[in-house]
Image (cartoon, rainbow, N blue to C red):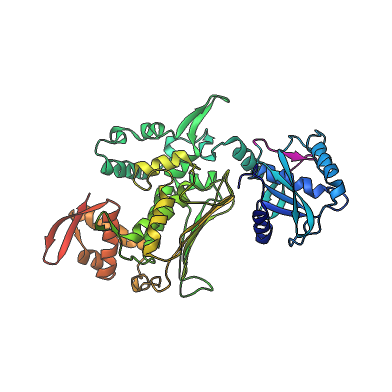
Amino acid sequence: MELRDALDDAQLRNLIAQGENEQLEFKRAGEGPKPDLYETICSFGNHAGGLIVLGLEDDGTPVGVNPRRIKEYQQNIVNVLHNPQTFSAAPHVHFQEKEYDGKILLCLFVESSPDVIRYKNETYDRVFDADVRVHTTSQLASLYNRKLRIYSEEQILPFLSIEDFNPAIINRARDLAVTRNSEHPWKRMTNGELLRYSSLWRKDFRTNESGYTLAAALLFGNDDVISSVCPTYSVDAVVRIINQDRYDARETVQTNLLDSYERLYRFLIRYLPDPFYLENQQRVSSKQIVVRELLSNILMHQEFTSPLPAQIEVTSEGIATKNASVSEFEGYLQVDDFTPIAKNPKISDVFREIGYADKLGSGVRNLQKMYPAFSSQKPEFHDGKQFVSRFHINGALLQLPESAMEEKTPVNDVDRAIEDLLSSQGTISAQELAEKAQVTVRTANRHITDFVTRGKLRKVESRGRGYRYARS
């Protein structure tokens, strides 16, 4: 509900039954407002706003507010909020009196402030159901970025040079874009021109500082560059289907976003079922769509300067992702009625150019469209300090595939064998790949299919029951 809306009795009862959370706090009134009330007002104002109900115990038990003093309480609160000795910027608060189980309650609706608010020279932010004092440089920077709508991906790294980028990764991005559009503008650009054209080099006209950005480093930087500029960045993917105490398989990536996408894609695609799904009267791989949308979301929209690692977990209940976020909105997304906001617009633009993502907001909607093939439960999306998604999968469908357990050769070795065979003889077959990489034909076929799906291979001829493949 909007903070300016009045609560009716049913809404109030429903909120109290939910208990305290990121946007709801209960407080006793006592003989008057206490300092912790103002800490909560400060944290709500710095975060996504919220509702404070005076006259309740922490567990929601009503104790009430003295009805003869309720106007006095409101006046005292207003005086404190507008006193420059207590608040650096006055939070916007609206009051409403309510009767609940025979007790009078005072509801305070706190709006999210465009300014960073300090109470008695301390800054507070809301974390789950707690008011947390913000005191480290990184926490303050994140808070100011959120208020100023500054994208951390646009941070200029003045000493980053063209030599710090991996030319093979830039070439791969160019090839992917040209495969989708033969006349793509990147086709005839040098690497430096491509980076500038994609707004990965910029000048800050407020400071006169110029250079390549953090987004450029994350997309195309060498690993040592990425570990230097984003030392806490990583994506940790685990599978817990059989061994739930530890894990059945694990993949951790701390490399450029294109390699991260491909490594995580190859890892996850082995463990998800592929139930029948028709699109425009043609069967498509439902699991490829799910993996693509979950991965593009977690890589495009995470806050890379946060110390929280991104996480992907496959269990017998489905697949869940979690990544740090900077969001104006706190709560569950209503898929049919939400306005998507790009967290890293420059990274998102590159992902769309190379076919790793579609238009903004399409990922959430595609997952919503796909869920009936996997489960009767709708996917869940919660945004805030962390973006959390849960895509449910019927337990009868999701089990550790034999193909995943039988593969003994690392994924990178099989892919390297594909490249070696293509370089030496131009085309390959699944049988040749199986012999060279010392894996089963079934495993070889899976890797070839993955390359075909990503536009790296194409069928060129058929021999008997098999096919040969060449570079796209």
Point 38% across, 54% down: residue: 292
Please say if 245 is above or below 225. below
Observer-nearest of 364 and 72: 72
Query: In the rendered structure, which segment of residues is drawn in magenta?
Result: 114-124
Q: Is residue 119 magenta?
A: yes
Observer-nearest of 267 and 88: 88
Please say if 348 is above or below 129. above
Answer left or right for 37 relative to 370: right
Work out which residue is located at the far left of the displayed protein and give it: 464
Observer-nearest of 56 and 437: 56
Point 50% across, 43% down: residue: 343
Q: Position of residue 310 (x, y in %)?
A: 52, 55
Q: Position of residue 118 (x, y in %)?
A: 74, 39
Point 64% across, 41% down: residue: 143
Q: Is residue 92 magenta?
A: no
Answer left or right for 12 relative to 296: right
